[in-house]
Image (cartoon, rainbow, N blue to C red):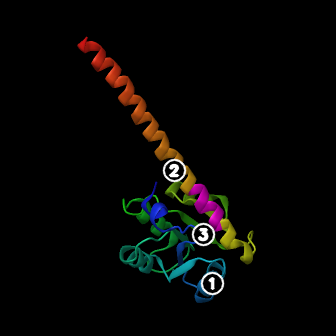
């Protein structure tokens, strides 16, 4: 299970979300929508500022990022996050109204994005619910993967001991 899931998603489902978008009106709108849904939103105007926030803040539960931004764009941000062990399992959701074609979505998923949302397909009031659904789905998949590894480890130990202890007879 990624570290953030166990620590900071509240019992009430509240999350700390890092919103990354160079458009101040978009950041304000998303902040309002997430706050209204009971989440805490931190904001960054570009990928460079987002990485600074991730390095400084604890318990970020998800990143929601635009693609086209100055300094470090969303694709570069996603790649950097996925290549850093501290954040490699952090849910990363693209939310764009410009880079919406299949090549962009495929590239985003290939970089390791949890999801790629077309802002034109989701009503603003539904964004927070969709994020909650995606993060919960991501956390559940991480849990299932961890549980699968534990079961595999237990099965290995059981069979290993049967073979090793059996040879001592």
Instruction: Place residue 27 in its image quadrant.
Output: bottom right
Q: In the rendered structure, are the residues bearing label 2 and label 1 in contact, judged by CB atoms less than 8 Å apart?
A: no
Pointer 2 local density, CA inside 10 Å: few below 14, some 14–19, many at least 20:
some
> Given this view, does label 3 or label 1 mark the residue nearer the observer?
3
Between the residue at mark 3 and the residue at mark 1, the CA separation in whole angstroms equals: 26 Å
Residue at 36% x, 30% y: name it.
Answer: 157
Instruction: Place residue 37 in its image quadrant.
Output: bottom right
Instruction: From the viewer's side, name the closer residue of 83 and 143.
Output: 143
Up-down relation of residue 87 to residue 16 (above or below): above
Q: Residue furthest top?
A: 169
Pointer 3 local density, CA inside 10 Å: few below 14, some 14–19, many at least 20:
few
- Secondary element at image label 3: loop
Between the residue at mark 2 and the residue at mark 1, the CA separation in whole angstroms equals: 32 Å
Q: Position of residue 16 (x, y in %)?
A: 52, 74
Residue at 52% x, 78% y: name it.
Answer: 69
Up-down relation of residue 162 to residue 40 (above or below): above
Find residue 26 and name its label: 1
Up-down relation of residue 8 to residue 161 (above or below): below
Q: Which residues are magenta?
A: 131-138
Find residue 12 and name its label: 3
Find residue 143 and name its label: 2
Residue at 57% x, 53% y: name it.
Answer: 140
Sequence-wise, the earlier of marks 2 and 1 is 1
């Amino acid at each position: 299970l990624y570290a953030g899931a166990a620590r900071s998603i509240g019992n009430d489902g509240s999350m700390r979300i890092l919103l990354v978008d160079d458009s101040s009106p978009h950041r304000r709108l998303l902040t309002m929508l997430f706050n209204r849904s009971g989440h805490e939103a931190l904001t960054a105007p570009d990928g460079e500022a987002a990485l600074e926030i991730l390095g400084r803040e604890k318990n970020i539960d998800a990143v929601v990022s635009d693609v086209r931004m100055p300094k470090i764009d969303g694709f570069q941000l996603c790649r950097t996050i996925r290549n850093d062990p501290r954040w490699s399992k952090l849910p990363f959701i693209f939310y764009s109204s410009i880079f919406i074609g299949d090549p962009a979505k495929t590239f985003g998923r290939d970089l390791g994005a949890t999801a790629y949302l077309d802002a034109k397909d989701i009503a603003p009031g539904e964004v927070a619910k969709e994020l909650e659904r995606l993060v919960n789905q991501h956390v559940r998949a991480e849990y299932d993967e961890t549980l699968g590894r534990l079961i595999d480890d237990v099965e290995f130990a059981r069979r290993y001991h049967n073979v090793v202890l059996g040879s001592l007879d």
